Image (cartoon, grey):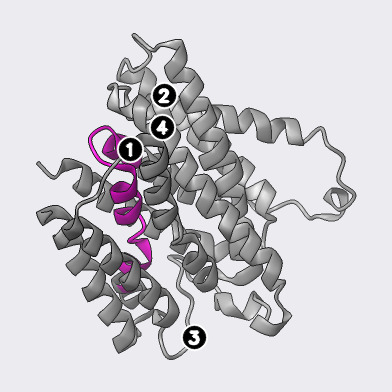
Amino acid sequence: MYLSEILSIGAALCIATSGMLAGELIGRIDALTLTRLQTLAVTIATTIGATLLGGWAGLLPWQVGYLSASGVFGIFIASSAYISSIFALGPRLALLVFSLTSPFALIMGYLFLGETVGPVKLAGVALVIAGIVLAILFGRPAKVQPEGIFPTPPIEAAVLPAKQMTLPVGLAFGLVAALGQAAGALVARPVMASGVNPFTAMAIRTGVSAVLFLLLLLVPRRSAARRPRPAARTLGIGICGALIGTGMGMSLIMAALAGGKVGIVSTLSSLSPVLVLPMVWLRTGYRPSAPAWAGAVLAFAGTSLIAAG
């Protein structure tokens, strides 16, 4: 009965794991190169998955068109802007801005799909959003420790202090990422409701985005020649994070959209900042602060309301 909610939370867990991997790469690779490599890797993986599962059979032209548009909004634009926001603001502020995906999706679902949300679920959405914001604001351990999966130097050492960050640019990237993610989910909703295989949907979405990223290589950039080639370990971490977050996580979101509403799916899949708290605790040995756990309680209370509503 609650399959779409379970799939959405599973997607959030994948995205949380991918975020820990992405935290390893701040200052080691530029955002555009990272997003391009991740998109290519996910395209190959999801294409293989769709082929093995026979997901290409019966695909209609209108479905391909909708999924292509969804890929432009949700991956080519949103993923690039999201990574750029992380590199400009740091993970904490970037995730805070990106949490606006949920209200954006609710508004778009209401305006364009005529979706309605009852008062109980609406209260659940509000609690989830409040929990996410609280967890992001106070979710770091008292002592700065690396929050990635691999033993590397502290991530924050490579991040500029808040006063030196390009705050307006980072906020703009975060808003674009949230809008793009919400629009991508909105456009994909009718296709997923028609029964398209999730791996097939992701293969089309990432494939279109990969082509656009490759076309960008034809655009001359003055700074491109001065950038050092990323190390093999950096590329490996980035690709692994993409397969977990974009490949598996986004496929779960596509599957959730087959039976769930855009706003609800987007909200539950945004639980990753909350789910990452115990992962950080296990990784670093430092317990997150009390407000962070309070945010987790609020978020899971909201999840219960959404399921009960």
Q: Earlier in the sequence, mark 1 or mark 4?
A: 1
Asked if the residues shown at circle 3 and circle 4 are in contact, with their CB atoms under 8 angstroms apart, the answer is no
| Residue located 46% across and 60% down the image | 100
The residue at 45%/90% (across/down) is 143
Residue at image point 67% right, 62% down: 28
Between 237 and 132, the residue placed more toward the observer is 132
Q: What's the CA distance linking mark 3 and mark 2?
A: 40 Å
Q: Percent from the top left, x then y, of residue 207?
A: 54, 27
Can residue 15 be spotted in the picture?
yes
Q: CA distance from mark 2 to mark 4?
A: 21 Å
The first of marks 2 and 1 along the sequence is 2
Question: Is 245 drawn above or below residue 159 in the view shown?
Answer: above
Left or right? Give the position of 271 relative to 218.
Answer: left
Kindly indicate whether the residue at mark 1 contacts the one at mark 2 (C-beta within 8 angstroms): no
Residue 271 is one of the magenta-drawn residues: yes
> Mark 1: which amino acid?
Gly
Residue bearing the label numbered 1? 114
Q: Quadrant of the C terminus?
A: bottom left
Q: What residue did someone put label 4 on?
A: 188
Distance, label 3 to label 1, CA atoms, is 46 Å
Q: Position of residue 63 (x, y in %)?
A: 42, 19
Type of amino acid under label 3 = Val
Considering the whole magenta stretch, tell me its main secondary structure.
helix
> Which disc, if any, is residue 144?
3
**One can see residue 287 in this view:** no
Residue under numbered circle 2: 48
Q: Magenta segment range?
A: 253-277
